[in-house]
Each structure stands twice: as C-alpha cells, then as structure tokens.
Amino acid sequence: MLHISSATAAKIVQKHGVAVNELRSALVGTEGLRFVWDDDPERGRRAIVETWIRGRRLLAVLYPAADPLGDAWHLGSAYFTDV
C-alpha cells in the first residue's frame, strides 16, 4: 500500500511533473525495483527506490508505514534524475 498525502501529491505534480497515477503504476506491485536504505538523522529510515516513468529515471523516497498487514509506505518525494 502506498500512502500519498494531498500536500505531497500536489508537490510532485507541480514541482516535479509526476502524476500520482503514474507513480502508483510504477511502484505498487512492481517486482524487482532497485532501492537503497537511507538513515537520515532528521527524517529517519527511508528507502530510495528507482523506477522508470515515460522512459525517464525516477527516484521515490518512501518511509515505512505502520500497517498490520505490512508492506505499507508513505511517499516523501519523487523526482526525475538525469542518468
């Protein structure tokens, strides 16, 4: 499950040009995505996940969410990168 707040959704659409539905399609239920764990002193433990949207590399910042069924995340940010 991917939780995206309205504020984060607005930011990724306006600032980074990423539609929420594109992001969900690229992340949710997609096997084999590359990621690294990052322990940020201010924000805590998070996963930086690599995916591709419209042929462009995108990094998504995901924070683990408390969920009794597990595998739930909060989206922190998502942005395109130049390879």
Image (cartoon, rainbow, N blue to C red):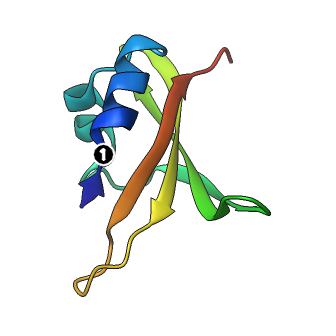
> Which residue is pictured at 25% across the width and 87% down the height?
68
Q: Position of residue 65 (x, y in %)?
A: 39, 70
Quarter the C terminus occupies: top right
- Relative to 49, 73 lies left or right: left
Quarter the N terminus occupies: bottom left
Task: Read off the residue under disc 1.
Answer: 4
Q: Position of residue 39 (x, y in %)?
A: 74, 65
Which residue occupies the foreground of this view, 37 or 68?
68
Q: Position of residue 59 (x, y in %)?
A: 55, 35
> Which residue is pictured at 28% across the width and 21% down the height?
19
Vertically, is 66 above or below 59?
Answer: below
Which residue occupies the foreground of this view, 26 or 42?
42
> Which residue is pictured at 33% across the width and 24% down the height?
10
- Relative to 52, 82 lies left or right: right
**Total residue callouts:** 1
| Label 1 environment density (alpha carbons within 10 Å; few <14, some 14–19, many ≥20) | some
Q: Position of residue 36 (x, y in %)?
A: 66, 56
Which residue sits furthest bottom?
68
Which residue sits furthest front?
7
> Which residue is pictured at 39% across the width and 56% down the height?
74
Which residue occupies the foreground of this view, 41 or 51?
41
Vertically, is 70 above or below 42?
Answer: below
Residue type highlighted by circle 1: Ile
- Relative to 31, 20 lies left or right: left
Kind of element beneath mark 1: loop
- Relative to 77, 67 lies left or right: left
